[in-house]
Image (tube, grey):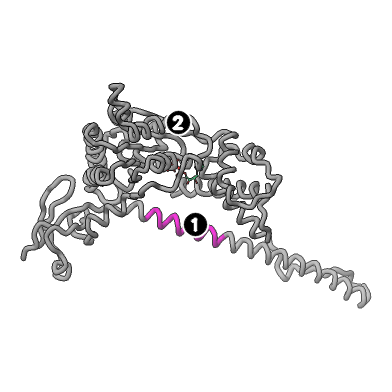
């Protein structure tokens, strides 16, 4: 129960002298001032904490709202008539007549792509196909990642080289020996372990164009376009031979079939079928290699792992202590670190860190040094950085659980 002002009992006896009363009151005043100060600090802290939670709440509410919004479907305008606009939905090719405002009608022409909602009303006009391609595909001529930038993963690197590099650089050897090179390579393992790096490095070393597409974007950005984008992906690769196609998060398009028959699932199936048929016709594809990556190997539909498809599986695990040491060395190459920095000890301290975590630790350690007005980064900076990153990762986990 909180004290009220009426509860005040005076810190002196009734018969105390005036002087005694003054000094007793003085003392009490000092104590109360100190308590008041302490309370104010606590209040400030609580306010700051409250603000933080408020912001988190807003972020989660926003995220929640976004997830609940129903997806849009893509359609192409067939005809603009007096009765409305005839559209053809991508995916199921169904035609429909839909009404639009006069204002929107003025802007629409046959062949324009539009996004429609569940009741087939046009929600917005979409940018042209070339823009979509550019948005979902990352095309880089010889990306700037080399094998020397990858720490640990010697075995994985060796396997990727045999299965991707050899067929690109010496296709004749496979012909001479009379065997087919593996069609596709699937890299699987936890996030941030260097799967994308491996794919980029092999493209770089073979002077190939690196073409990346994320499985999740393929199926979640605009429903109805997945299959077409897969076709486009292989077409772009053919235009840029030699090329390495990299499909990240392949589980988004090649997950095990589920019982539900929602349009989303049907769309994912169509996208996967297109990918399988592109891969099955792969012998004629010349100098194109396909690498896919997933963090969710358990979710994959086994159809994509059949011979002739992703028939070479390479596990990319989190680095062991030796791997972590190498990755620390790589990411501190351009940093001004203390001469006596013990990389092996850092590796021991950071058990369970992925390559991406180590990169983040190095940057964060540099920030700690800067905050401390130093130009040399020392062991304690790395330790603090790892603590901070672990705390942030835990926070992220909590956010995901409540989202
Ligand atoms: N083995 C490694 N050696 C050096 N750096 C690494 C390694 N693994 C990860 N990194 C660093 O982490 C970053 C992210 O790694 P990358 O994108 O290759 O991971 P990934 O396995 O493809 O992750 P995800 O599954 O999340 O797509 C890289 O740009 C690199 O800086």
Picture quarter containing residue 326? top right
Q: Position of residue 174 (x, y in %)?
A: 31, 26
Residue at horizontal 58 percent and vertical 59 percent from the top = 49
Q: Quadrant of the N terminus?
A: bottom right
Which residue lies under the disc numbered 1?
Answer: 56
Compared across the picture, whether 41 is left or right of 258 comes to right
Evaluate if marks 1 and 2 touch, with contact meaning CB atoms under 8 Å apart: no
Q: Nearer the viewer, residue 176 or 245?
A: 176
Query: Is residue 357 depicted above or below 104 in this figure?
Result: above
Instruction: In this rendered view, identify the residue nearer to me: 277 or 67.
Output: 277
First reached walking from the N terminus: tag 1 or tag 2: 1
Residue 31 magenta: no
Provide the residue designation for mark 2: 158
x and y percentages locating residue 389 in the rendered image: 57, 48
Asked if residue 386 can be seen in this view, the reply is: yes
Q: Mark 1 falls on what kind of element?
A: helix
Residue at left 35%, top 49%? 141
Crowd tier of the residue under label 1, counting other residues whose Cα lies within 10 Å: few below 14, some 14–19, many 20 or above: few
Q: Which residues are magenta?
A: 50-65
Residue beneath the point at 80% across and 68% down: 9
Residue most extreme to the bottom: 18
Secondary structure mostly seen in the magenta stretch? helix
Instruction: Kindly identify which numbered label has been placed on residue 13.
Output: none
Distance, label 1 to label 2, CA atoms, is 44 Å
Is 171 situated left or right of 322 in this image?
A: left
Image coords of residue 161 (percent x, y) = 41, 33
């Amino acid at each position: 129960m909180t004290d009220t002002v009426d509860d005040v009992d005076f810190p002196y006896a009734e018969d105390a002298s005036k002087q005694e009363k003054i000094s007793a009151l003085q003392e009490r005043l000092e104590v109360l001032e100190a308590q008041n100060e302490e309370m104010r600090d606590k209040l400030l802290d609580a306010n700051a904490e409250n603000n933080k939670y408020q912001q988190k709440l807003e972020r989660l509410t926003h995220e929640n709202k976004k997830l609940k919004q129903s997806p849009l479907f893509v359609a192409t305008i067939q005809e603009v008539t007096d009765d409305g606009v005839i559209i053809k939905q991508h995916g199921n090719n169904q035609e429909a007549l839909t009404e639009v405002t006069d204002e929107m009608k003025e802007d629409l022409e046959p062949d324009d792509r539009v996004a429609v909602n569940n009741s087939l009303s046009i929600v917005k006009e979409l940018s042209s196909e070339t823009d979509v391609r550019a948005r979902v595909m990352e095309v880089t001529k010889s990306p700037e990642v080399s094998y020397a930038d990858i720490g640990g993963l010697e075995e994985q690197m060796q396997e990727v080289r045999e299965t991707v590099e050899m067929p690109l650089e010496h296709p004749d050897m496979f012909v001479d020996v009379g065997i087919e090179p593996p069609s596709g390579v699937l890299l699987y393992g936890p996030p941030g372990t260097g799967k994308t790096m491996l794919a980029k490095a092999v493209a770089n070393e073979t002077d190939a164009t690196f073409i990346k597409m994320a499985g999740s974007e393929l199926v979640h950005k605009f429903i109805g376009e997945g299959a077409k984008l897969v076709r486009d992906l292989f077409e772009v690769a053919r235009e840029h031979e030699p090329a390495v196609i990299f499909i990240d998060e392949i589980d988004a398009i090649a997950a095990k079939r589920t019982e539900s028959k929602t349009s989303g699932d049907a769309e994912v199936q169509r996208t996967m079928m297109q990918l399988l048929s592109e891969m099955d016709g792969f012998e004629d594809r010349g100098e194109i290699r396909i690498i896919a990556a997933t963090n969710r190997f358990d979710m994959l539909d086994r159809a994509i792992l059949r011979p002739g498809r992703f028939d070479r599986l390479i596990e990319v695990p989190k680095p062991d202590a030796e791997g972590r040491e190498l990755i620390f060395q790589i990411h501190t190459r351009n940093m001004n670190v203390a001469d006596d920095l013990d990389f092996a000890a850092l590796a021991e301290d950071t058990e369970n860190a992925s390559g991406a975590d180590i990169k983040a630790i190095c940057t964060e350690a540099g920030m700690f040094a800067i905050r401390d007005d130093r130009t040399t980064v020392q062991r304690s900076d790395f330790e603090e950085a790892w603590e901070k990153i672990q705390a942030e990762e835990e926070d992220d986990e909590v956010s995901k659980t409540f989202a």
